[in-house]
Amino acid sequence: MPVGNRKNILYRLTLPVFGLRCRWRGVSCEPGEGAASPARDLSRAVERVFRRHHVVGGCVQVIRGGTLAERYAAGYADLALREAVTPGTLFRTASVAKMACALLVMRLQTRGLLDVHEDISALWGAPIRNPQHPDTPIPLCSLLSHTSGLMDSPLYFQSFGRAVTVDEILADGACFTTREPGQRFQYSNFAAGLVGCLLERRFGVSLATLAQRELFDPLEARATFDLASLVGTPPASSYRVLPPSRRPAFDAPRRLRDARPILAPDPQRHYLLASGSLFLTAEALARLALPVVNGGHAARGVFLSLEAVSHMKTPSTAWPEPEVRMRHGMGLLEVDDRKVSKNRLYGHQGFAYGAVNGVFLDERGSGFASLNSGASEQRLGHLSLLNRDLIDLLLNGDGYA
């Protein structure tokens, strides 16, 4: 993905000429659950945003007043099969999974089963310390806010191709920054993935089972961390639109054929789940986010305590890229920039294999969840320009009712 101003400028200049173009027709719209209607039919406006950002296929679930509103879908989930995206299409979320895992942690805290300020050594059952700060505990909350002092080491990246255990990574000093826990923001996929491993150690079940029981089923969200459970219903593949390729960077049918069911906990090796390997629909992603803007409430009553909601929404550190005013709480980004939105936003993004996903809501209880099978990866700072245009349409413009 383009990281840095120069790469983003080059990406912007070459995308209109060389970017992958998909010849899909129009955007379909399904009504919501009784929420206020949009000020006008937004199908054409959503289509323009999708085409501007070369979306291969995608779905947007709109939220208004804390309620699921209409859903827009267009394009392809699989180019070779010419399989169309529908509101029921499942997508790989990439880093949006980190928000889901944080919601799971906060649900467990709300139930009195966990404390976000607990030393992760107690959860792991063995000491975990930054070797440069051996006397300083690393609290669970610091993993959620990316202030733990853990970072993505070369050994972590090697784990994509070969089996590497958590203990091996933690024994490598390269996975720690020089800063004391809690002092500095350092985005870390490994730290976020470690949360899932700690939960497996504490509760003795797989992250997939725990999330299904405590998060997805109670919120009636069609979601899973267990790809093998989707046999017969493959999720969308993902494509890079620049450099263009009609071969998927994430080949969902092949991955599904190779997937093994997650039947038991494996805390030494499951750190790649919570950091990005979640599969769900756009509607399900919106359902997960609703308690954050509804005061912790869900359809069946209180789901998160007000303290848990506050933990997620209260930022601890600023994002290091200054172009957009963003700060990170426990599992949620805060966007407080009037050039982006006239209201403060909360949410998360996910970038992987060409997919550019996002969920953003404001304190009025309005927002959207957007998932796709590939799109322009151009950003301003960390904020995807696709997500920025959806924010402008659905939260700043007359798409808001």
Image (cartoon, grey):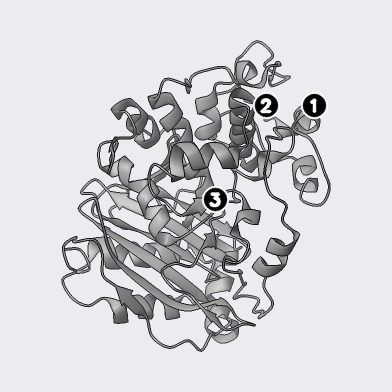
x 84%, y 48%: residue: 162
x 58%, y 42%: residue: 208
Where does residue 324 sit, x and y in percent of width and height?
41, 52
Distance of label 3 from label 2 (alpha carbons): 36 Å
Q: Quadrant of the N terminus?
A: bottom right
Q: Earlier in the sequence, mark 2 or mark 1?
A: 1
Horizontal relation, residue 154 to residue 394: left or right:
right
Residue 158 lies, with reference to residue 206, above or below; the image says: below
Where does residue 296 sit, x and y in percent of width and height?
29, 36
Judge by depth and name the residue closer to the eye, 233 or 41: 233
Judge by depth and name the residue closer to the eye, 74 or 49: 74
Residue wearing tag 3: 224
Horizontal relation, residue 320 to residue 362: left or right:
right
Q: Secondary structure at mark 2?
A: loop
x 30%, y 56%: residue: 367
In this rendering, which labeled residue sits more in front, label 2 or label 1?
1
Residue wearing tag 1: 171
Q: Earlier in the sequence, mark 3 or mark 1?
A: 1
Disc 3 marks which amino acid? Answer: Thr
Q: Is residue 61 visible?
A: yes
Disc 1 marks which amino acid? Answer: Ala
Distance of label 2 from label 1 (alpha carbons): 15 Å
Q: Which residue reaches farthest top?
A: 135
x 72%, y 56%: residue: 259
Q: Secondary structure at mark 1?
A: helix
Residue wearing tag 2: 178
Q: Residues within 10 Å of mark 3 (few under 14, many from 20)?
A: many
